[in-house]
Amino acid sequence: MTLHIKRADASDAKALQQLNEAFNENGMTVENIAASLRVGRPEIIFIAYMDEQPAGFISGVTNQSIWYKSLYASVDELFVDEAFRRKGIAAKLIEAIEAEFRARGVAAAFIITGAKNQAAQAAYTKCGYEGYARMEFRKDL
């Protein structure tokens, strides 16, 4: 099995729509996603393909706030399709977005997940994130 992770672009819209529908069931269309990717929105999105099949995605943003001394980032969405879980794909997606965060000068990244999502919490801890606040994980970059 071959894993390929890349920065998402409009050519990935159909795959992202399929994954997002499994994750959020929010009705976003391929056209909506493709248009958003073409406009150059601030989200940083990576998609994972396992043997050319869409396997997962991650998205996040960087931000400079008056409340923080340095640039920080947050991972807003992370999803791996059930058929591809427990293969290290989430960790590889996190590594990909962290590399982009570092390249942009980010000092720390935050991830928020549900209180009952034990699998996600374990994955984030395994990737070096520590409990920072209630259901928020932080990792110095």
Image (cartoon, rainbow, N blue to C red):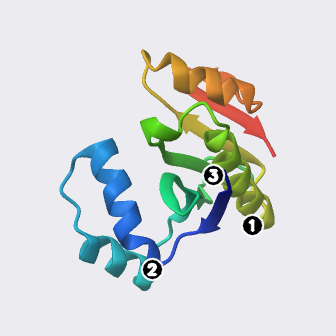
From this viewpoint, which residue is outermost toward the left? 27
Dot 1 or dot 3: first in sequence order is: 3
> Which numbered disc, 2 or 3, marks the residue closer to the eye?
2
Residue located 54% across and 34% down the image: 85
Dot 2 or dot 1: first in sequence order is: 2
Residue located 40% across and 64% down the image: 15
Residue under pointer 2 = 11
Dot 2 or dot 3: first in sequence order is: 2
The answer to whether residue 138 is left or right of residue 79 is right
Q: Secondary structure at mark 3?
A: strand
Relative depth, front residue between 100 and 89: 89
> Which numbered disc, 2 or 1, marks the residue closer to the eye?
2
Q: Secondary structure at mark 1?
A: loop
Could you tell me if residue 71 is visible in this image? Answer: no
Q: Residues within 10 Å of mark 2 (few under 14, many from 20)?
A: few
As drawn, the label of residue 104 is 1
Q: CB atoms at circles 1 and 3 under 8 Å apart?
A: yes
Amino acid beneath label 1? Arg
Residue located 44% across and 35% down the image: 82
Horizontal and vertical percent for residue 42? 50, 70
Considering only vertical position in the picture, is 60 above or below 37?
Answer: above
Residue located 69% across and 24% down the image: 125
The answer to whether residue 12 is left or right of residue 111 is left
Residue under pointer 3 = 73
Amino acid beneath label 2? Ser
